[in-house]
Amino acid sequence: MRGKRHSAILTTLATAAAAAVPLVAITAAATAAPSASAATATQPYTWQNVKIGGGGFIDGIEFSPAQPNLLYAHTDIGGAYRWNQPTSTWTPLLDWVGQSNWGWNGVVSLAPDPSNANKVWAAVGMYTNSFDPNNGAILRSSNQGATWQSTTLPFKLGGNMPGRGMGERLAVDPNNDNILYLGAPSGNGLWRSTDGGVTWSQVTSFPNAGNYAPDPTDTSGYSSALEGVTWVAFDKATGTTGSATQTIFAGVADLQNTVYESTNGGSAWTRVAGQPTGFIAHHGVVDSTNGILYIATSNTGGPYDGSSGDVWKYTIATGAWTQISPVSSTGGAYYGYSGLAIDPEHPSTIMVTAYSSWWPDTIIWRSINGGSTWNQIWNWTSYPSRSFSYTQDITSEPWLTFNGTPSPPVVTPLLGWMTEDLAIDPFNSNRMMYGTGATLYGTNNLTNWDSGGTITITPMVNGIEETAVLSLISPPSGAPLLSGLGDINGFVHTSLTAVPAAMYSSPSFAAASMDYAELNPSVIIRTGDVNKTNNPNVNRIAFSTNDGTNWFQGQEPPGVTGGGTAAEAADASATVWSTGGAGVFYSTSYGGSWTASTGLPTGALVASDRVTPTEFYGFSGGTFYVSTNSGASFTATAATGLPASGTVFIKAMPGHAGDVWLAGGPSTNSGIWHSTNSGATFTKLSNVTAAQNIGFGKAAPGQTYQALYTIATIGGTQGIFRSDDAGANWIQINDAQHQWGNIGQAITGDPRVYGRVYVGTNGRGIIYGDPSGNVTPSPSPSTTSASPTPTPTTSPTPTPTTSPSPTPTTTTAALACHVSYSTQSQWAGGFVANVTLNDTGTAPINGWTLGFTFAGDQQVTSDWGTTITQSGAKVTATNVSYDGAISAGGNTSFGFQGTWASSDSPPTSFTVNGATCT
């Protein structure tokens, strides 16, 4: 189903259980994410997206009430964005989120400050079940999202969970921006902050945490999760500047009790009498001018389903409810309502969407009299004909037709689906935007509709890239890149800077596995999963003989249940397909017929040698296999020490027969292995602590062996690395601001452009990078840890300066401090910790040395934002160049990773510059 994507969770993260956060509220300064180890060379890169445009669910659009042309958008797995008015583009705000806290790219809600244009908050976290090992967090920014500070919550949030289109869950008091509310899922109720989002506590007087779950029997915890408190809305007229707003409404995922009210600034809450039952209010919006609460409801939490709903207005002064549905739940509404918005300049003008109307299209309504009458954006004339109050121009995103050639009444492109959020510009009544499961649409002539004219709807998604990338290949000729993407199949990218015209078709499926013939690269294959119930004539493997311009599907052997992986012979003379469910087969007729291979287990990974046409490779359960007869039979090699589980990738080096690389594995045995004898033996690279994937690109000047690219942990740092000498030395090429959350499913270099690398993300599309400066060599040999090394959960800062660390000058007598220590994540034998040092005195701290003693048997293996030395259980942490100065009342944070054998008990006392801290 379009728009529905679960995160591709890497084994190393899925097996690392999150430790309980010991503090209800953790204050984290804008600290530096881990930088390159002193033992790792670095090189600056310029990073940008391969242009696609959207590609996923836009579940939130937030105009700032404080400044014209300032607006934000958020996505379910692809982070948040800020609008750039001069260029009509979006700037990503969460690319600093790394592997250890990848779930923070699931944005549950985003709230601009109603009175201060610089401030904005975000509630982040991707899953409330075991898919995401970490708790959710509140991010806060005082510079429109350029940098953030974070507070980790004592529970999880679900940016990609059912019900994610409802909201906004996070809201700022319009009269006092120190007060914020958060509606929490999973029975955690309503939470409040009174210090600008730094600390949070539960509103114990709130009576209903929500009892609705889409499928209580779901054992995965995904559809059985309680959707909780789903939105908060203020009646601004009941407060004055600097004081708490008195009347507040909250929505709850409870079919019988969906709206609650407080009339005393959140101290006490009651169920609103007379409210509709049998429905969940997806959105609640207050018209403070006229004293009205509007709600849009559905009989489910969405964002896909919902077969009935209504729109209501509640007159706050009288307590009267009035149904104002464009089509009532008893009068033919086969959809739920959402996308509710008021025009702030004309508050009697309201809009609403039929978010779950999949056929023939979504529906948008507009009323200029408070819902007494409605205009529908399209209407039936004589079936199957319709009339339209809009024109749609998708010139900038032509693939939005989804290769469709529908018959009336369906048209292409569609207005959308999953249209859960719609927003009207508070400074410009002509501008409206709404999110869909594939893109963000908008118009700049909205009021034309009111006088009987038509509005022009166009994609307004330039800069938002939120596809989940499954596979990438960069052949030596033809288009520079071909992609396999969740939901929207994938593309032939003839240009990296132009949106592709059309996605793959004939057949149409998301390409989870792709390959090309190294010596005949115009031949390309792809495999993927297909819903045979809906697409009985679509098979799971496709071939192209003209660089991906045209495709035809191959036959399927009996019993195939999934796309699996496939490999193409170096000269395109044979194809080996390791199918889902049916075993391994080979074909010499582009899939015209298949013969079962022998010797290779069902579900094995397959790859082809890039020089010898008859040679193929397989891997399963720690055993490496080789075929020398075009895949007819495979024989296990004697290679040992390879990972027996986990996510693994095998790739053969172009231009070198029998040269094979293997990367990945479980957290206990992850890394990179290399063979030069067709897998007879492998050598594990000792300078790589852990790895997730590997790819190849054009050789460095003067070299004949292609450059290697990997997503790995090297020199104590998790990041993206390049090696120009077959893995002997590595250069880190990304930095703290370019992390992109959960990467690792796809990476490849460009065989035609030295230094260029393509990286697949899970929600931020395809990233490509090119060198933009010289290599800074490593000053000393590296020492790597054997433990898994997820990137620590930290917030980003501007690039630190290179000035010397200040000499400590604050005297012990004048120093007052407070230290917070938290275990951010923990697994068997390892952990990541974060420490926040607060200057609670009246004098600044100019350089600091923090001391503590572990209560367990921990050993620090790497650090960031500090330099750590350890003697036995005693630890000394000293500032680095950019975080030594702490102003009175300010703070700084640093982190480290370590190992433990029998106990990971945290320290209980701390000193700074010799003074004891609280």
Image: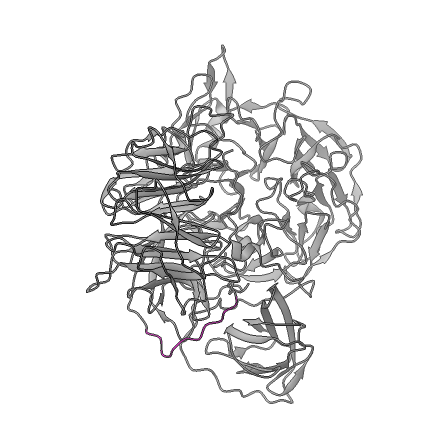
Residue 6 shown left or right of residue 650 in the figure: right
Residue 785 lies in the magenta stretch: yes
Quarter of image, res 323: top right
Q: Is residue 52 visible in this depiction of the protein?
A: no
Name which residue lies at 47% across and 41% down.
Answer: 602
Residue 337 lies in the magenta stretch: no
**Residue 477 percent coordinates (x, y):** 22, 45
Magenta residues?
777-787
**Residue 892 percent coordinates (x, y):** 56, 73
Quarter of image, res 280: top right
Name which residue lies at 61% across and 58% down.
Answer: 17
- What residue occupies the far top of the structure in this picture? 382
Q: Out of 789 and 284, give the one closest to the viewer.
A: 789
Q: Is residue 835 visible in this depiction of the protein?
A: yes
**Residue 621 percent coordinates (x, y):** 49, 52
**Residue 784 percent coordinates (x, y):** 45, 72
Q: Where is 409 relative to 221, above or below?
A: above
Residue 716 shown left or right of residue 191 in the figure: left
Q: Out of 911 and 489, give the one closest to the viewer.
A: 489
Residue 592 shown left or right of residue 703 in the figure: right
Most common secondary structure along the magenta stretch: loop
